[in-house]
């Protein structure tokens, strides 16, 4: 999929666990794992906004586009 989710990068920068992020955002750890692992079909703007607020980042820090061959950076 050409949209890559970089939640792991922000979690590492903030020294935060997946469980802690899920609690603070208000979603289940299972749903966060689906998003984090790139298996989500969609993400609500409210969820994206909550992730950005908790992680103190911009949406572009969490999502990026790549071409199918991986050269879209």
Image (tube, rainbow, N blue to C red):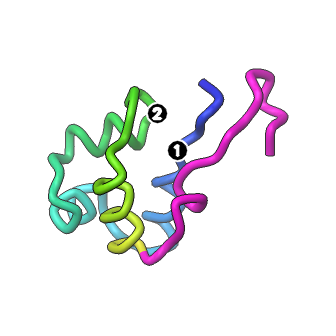
| Foreground residue among 50 and 39 | 50
The residue under the point 52% across, 60% down is 59
Q: Main secondary structure of the magenta part?
A: loop
Circles 2 and 1, Cβ within 8 Å, touching? The answer is: yes
Q: Viewed as shown, does residue 31 lie left or right of 6?
A: left
* Above or below 57: residue 17: above
Q: Viewed as shown, does residue 34 lie left or right of 15?
A: left
- The CA span between labels 2 and 1 is 6 Å
**Quadrant location of residue 37?**
top left
Question: Start and end of the magenta stretch?
Answer: 56-73
Tell me the SS state at disc 1.
strand
Identify residue for label 1: 5
**Residue 50 at x, y percent in the picture:** 30, 64
Q: Quadrant of the N terminus?
A: top right
N-term-proximal mark, 2 vs 1: 1
Q: Is residue 58 magenta?
A: yes
**Residue 48 at x, y percent in the picture:** 38, 56
Tell me the SS state at disc 2.
loop
Residue 68 is tagged as: none
Identify residue for label 2: 38
- Mark 2: few, some, or many residues within 10 Å (few <14, many ≥20)? some
Q: Viewed as shown, does residue 51 lie left or right of 9?
A: left
């Amino acid at each position: 999929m050409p949209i890559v989710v970089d939640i792991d990068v922000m979690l590492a920068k903030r020294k935060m666990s997946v469980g802690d992020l899920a609690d603070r955002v208000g979603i289940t750890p299972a749903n966060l794992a689906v998003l984090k692992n790139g298996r989500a079909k969609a993400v609500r703007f409210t969820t994206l906004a909550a992730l950005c607020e908790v992680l103190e980042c911009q949406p572009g820090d969490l999502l990026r586009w790549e071409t199918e061959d991986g050269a879209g950076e």
